[in-house]
Image: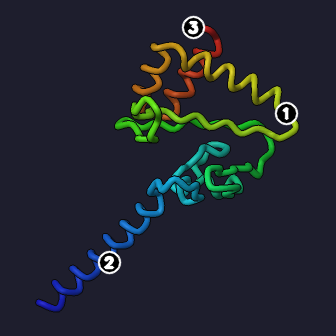
Amino acid sequence: MLEDIKKDATDRMGKCVNAFRQELKRLRTGRASASLVDHIRVDYYGAESPLNQVANVAVEDARTITIVPYDKQMVGTIGRSAAGIDFAALDHAPVYSIVLLLSPENAPQQHLQAMNAVFNNLQKDTFRRFLRQSSTREAIAELLDEADQGK
C-alpha cells in the first residue's frame, strides 16, 4: 500500500517537473527562441495542426523568429487570449489578439493589402470588442467576413 502511494507520488511529481520545464522554455529572456511558438496551433485545410508541422520555424538572430510556411500561398491566423498576454509593451497593456500573416516572398503587395485590411478593422472599437468576445473559430471567421463586406 505504502509503495503504491510512493510510486503514484513519484509519477505525479515527475509530470509536474516536466510541465514546469516546458513552461520554462517559453520564458521571455530577451532572446528569441523557436520554443516560444511550439504551442501555437493553426487551421490548416480545416484541421488544427501545430505551427511547426506546417511551417519552418527558425531563429534568425536574438530578436527575430522566422516562420516560413511550406505551402507558399497567403495564410493568416488570429490568436486570442481572454486573460491577455504580457509582451512587455511600452504602454504596459496586455495583448488580447495576435495577428499572424504569412505571404510568399514574391508577393509583397498582397501582404501589404492584407495588413491594411486587418489594421483598418483593428482600429474600430466594435471590431476589437467582438473579436475578444468570439469564442470559436467560426465566430471569428464570420466577424472577418462581415468586416470585409463593410457591415
- Disc number for residue 54: none
Crowd rating for badge 1 (residues with CA inside 10 Å; few <14, some 14–19, many 20+): few
Q: Amino acid at mark 3?
A: Lys
Identify which residue is drawn at 23% across, 86% down.
7
Element marked by disc 2: helix
**102 displayed left or right of 90:** right
Q: Point out residue 141 in the picture as x, y percentages from the top left corner.
A: 57, 27
Q: Residues within 10 Å of mark 3 (few under 14, many from 20)?
A: few
Quarter of the figure with residue 148: top right
Give the mark, 3 or 2, whose residue is nearer the N terminus.
Answer: 2
Q: Amino acid at mark 1?
A: Ala
The dot on residue 151 is: 3
Looking at the image, which residue is at 62% across and 43% down?
46
Where is residue 137 drawn, in percent x and y? 51, 34
Q: Nearer the viewer, residue 7 or 89?
A: 89
Above or below, 108 against 44 in this view is above
Of the residues tagged 3 and 1, which is closer to the observer?
1
**Residue nearest the observer in this picture, 53 or 86:** 86
The alpha-carbon separation of the residues under discs 3 and 1 comes to 28 Å
- Which disc, if any, is residue 107? 1
The percent coordinates of residue 17 (x first, y second) are: 34, 73
Residue at image coords 46%, 53%: 28
The front one of 7 and 128 is 128
